[in-house]
Amino acid sequence: MSEIVLWLVFILTAFSSVQTAKYVPNWKKQACELPTSRKSHYICTDDGEVKCLPGWTGDLCDVPICRAGCDPMQGYCTQPGQCTCKLGYYGEKCDKCITLPGCQHGYCNTSFECNCKPGWDGIFCSEPICRNDCSGTRGYCDVPGECKCRLGWSGKTCKECQVLPGCVHGYCNKPLECKCLPGYTGILCQIPICSQSCHKERGYCLKPGKCRCKVGWWGNNCEKCYPYPGCEHGFCRRPWECNCEKGWGGMLCNEKLNYCENNPDICQNGSKCISLTREDGNYRCLCREGTFGVNCEKSKFNMTAGKPTFKPTVKTTTVVTTIEYVNFTNEIITSTPSVDNQENETENKTEKTPSKL
């Protein structure tokens, strides 16, 4: 038992002596034994210890101490006080990441990420997220929450078709259509359909089923014309006309044509009397064949016993009488009756009577 105790005492004493003696590694002894070079970042103390110069650390003082706060995972340095960022990071302390190139509305937690901000989508976060009820095919948006309609569509959610631009009284079942409402027609449904009886040329309308007359026309269906203002005994076929009724003349049909009635013997030799206006001479005589003169008072025949006879060996020619008369429009119309010229050589035995007009 005593021997065991002695051995234990010996072992403890040897261990304590080893602990009191400082252990110096061989690499340290060699580092201090060899002369220091210019690239060395340490000095050796008198007791053979390696002491690093300021800004350096490590067993051989070959590790530079980076700038304070430099991220140890995202930055590094080759000289003391520096902070060089690794690929994908930036900043004085290399604590900021670089997003994926092309990322527009996104951010990153690690390098080359593109996490979209609210309202944006897509690989580069460049696609805005439109309003929830916005049609995906008929609408689009430039900023989040918006809903713009594509060509041919309209409405808050772009689910309604858009009529053809300029469509006045129409609707659509598909984009850029213009189907007319009842009572309208035309490419842009801008023309109202007038009442069926309204004259197509003389009338028009501003509302369907109505009939308004153009200037110079009147009546329910614009079938009547306005005569010339002041026209008394005349009528019109077109606006502002004054076509005189029978027995009337003048610009305003206000002059009674009764000269022949009041002067029945003015035209002689059985000629016909035509009453005219005072401006045209009051009357005109339409002479029978063989008579002439203002009142047809002259004759180329010898009147015997009420019957005209030709003189012997007298060469006669049928007279072509030009007649001027007034129609209902107060226009003087010249009429030349078609009478064949006859050339007769008569002798004492030949006898002719004048032909009637």
Image (spheres, rainbow, N blue to C red):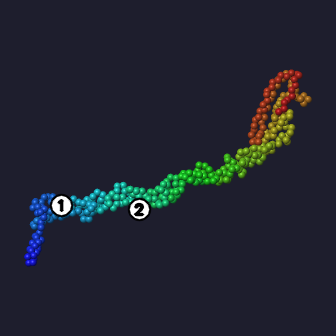
Residue 62: numbered disc? 1
Q: Residue at x 42, y 56 (%)?
A: 127
Residue 328: image quadrant is top right
Going by the numbered disc 1, the residue's amino acid type is: Asp
Horizontal relation, residue 265 to residue 191: left or right:
right
Residue 118: numbered disc? 2
Q: Is residue 344 above or below residue 29?
A: above
Q: In the rendered image, which quarter contains the N terminus?
A: bottom left
Q: Label 2 crowding class (10 Å Cα cut-off): few <14, some 14-19, many 20+?
A: few
Indicate the position of residue 223 as horizontal and vertical percent values. Answer: 72, 48
User: Helix or strand or loop: what does disc 1 sit on?
Assistant: loop
Kindly give the residue lying farthest to the right in the view shown: 305
Kindly give the residue lying farthest to the front in the view shown: 1
Indicate the position of residue 302 as horizontal and vertical percent values. Answer: 87, 27
Indicate the position of residue 201 as horizontal and vertical percent values. Answer: 67, 46
Horizontal relation, residue 212 to residue 150: left or right:
right
Q: Label 1 crowding class (10 Å Cα cut-off): few <14, some 14-19, many 20+?
A: some
Residue 5: image quadrant is bottom left
Q: In the rendered image, which quarter contains the C terminus?
A: top right
Horizontal relation, residue 276 to residue 34: left or right:
right
**Dot 2 or dot 1, earlier in sequence:** 1
Going by the numbered disc 2, the residue's amino acid type is: Pro
Q: Name the residue nearer the viewer: 338 or 189.
A: 189
* Residue 109 visible in the picture: yes
Residue 37: numbered disc? none
* Residue 215 visible in the picture: no
